[in-house]
């Protein structure tokens, strides 16, 4: 998803302060906007899903492309093991909570007590479950799938549009005061 931002007053600022100062203010505002957008994604994800901050933040990277006045948020990550979502073994299967407040039971699964413990399901062949040793590790969604499948990107866009103008104005005023 691409978020286009229009910052007002750039031409007037170039006329008053000079192009190098305005470009420097724009670069600083973009860097700050990128880290702020990363924080917003993290906050919105943690409000909706049962994910820890430290695990989420290491998968979101801010890549500034300052010559083009763009920032890229790279979100990557593998599928998350189900044990991570607070898995508890019950008589009917394993109960997990991917979304906050919603618990789901996955039938015919169990928790293997190895290091680290994982959620497994017996393999099915011919409509019957295969006895011992034929097990399949169960994994949940990846972080990019969670970001794409929700309203998180819309929330970041709502935050970023007004914030961009504020950041540019504050950086420009700080640099112009520092210069004089």
Image (spheres, rainbow, N blue to C red):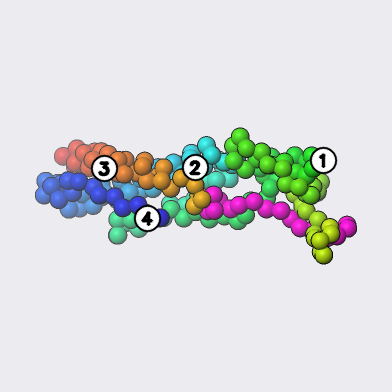
Which residue position is annotated with label 2?
Answer: 42
Q: In which quarter of the image is the N terminus?
A: bottom left
Q: In this view of the protein, can residue 110 be seen by the observer?
A: yes
Is 94 left, or right, of 35 in this rendering?
Answer: right
Mark seen at residue 91:
1
Q: N-terminal of the two: label 3 or label 4?
A: 4
Which residue position is annotated with label 4?
Answer: 2
Q: Are marks 4 and 2 in contact (CB under 8 Å)?
A: no
Q: Nearer the viewer, residue 110 or 84?
A: 110
Element class at badge 4: loop
Is 165 left, or right, of 52 in this rendering?
Answer: left
Identify the residue at the far left of this view: 15
Q: Are marks 1 and 3 in contact (CB under 8 Å)?
A: no
Is 55 left, or right, of 164 in this rendering?
Answer: right
**Total numbered labels placed on residues in the image:** 4
Q: Position of residue 44 (x, y in %)?
A: 48, 40
Cα separation, mark 3 vs mark 4, equals 18 Å
Identify the residue at the far bottom of this view: 126
Cα separation, mark 4 vs mark 2, equals 18 Å
Residue bounds of the magenta highlight? 130-146
Cα separation, mark 2 vs mark 1, equals 35 Å
Q: In which quarter of the image is the C terminus?
A: top left
Which residue position is annotated with label 3?
Answer: 165
């Amino acid at each position: 998803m691409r978020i286009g931002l229009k910052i007002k007053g750039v031409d007037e600022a170039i006329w008053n302060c000079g192009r190098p100062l305005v470009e420097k203010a724009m670069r600083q505002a973009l860097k700050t906007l990128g880290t702020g957008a990363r924080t917003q994604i993290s906050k919105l994800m943690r409000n909706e899903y049962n994910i820890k901050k430290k695990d989420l933040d290491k998968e979101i990277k801010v890549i500034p492309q300052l010559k083009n006045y763009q920032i890229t948020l790279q979100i990557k990550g593998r599928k998350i093991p189900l044990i991570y979502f607070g898995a508890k073994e019950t008589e009917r299967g394993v109960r997990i909570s991917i979304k906050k407040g919603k618990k789901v039971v996955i039938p015919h699964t169990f928790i293997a007590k190895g290091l680290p413990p994982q959620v497994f399901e017996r393999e099915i062949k011919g409509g019957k479950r295969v006895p011992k040793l034929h097990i399949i590790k169960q994994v949940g969604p990846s972080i990019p799938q969670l970001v794409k499948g929700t309203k998180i990107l819309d929330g970041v866009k709502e935050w970023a549009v007004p914030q961009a103008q504020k950041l540019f104005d504050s950086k420009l005023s700080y640099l112009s005061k520092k210069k004089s």
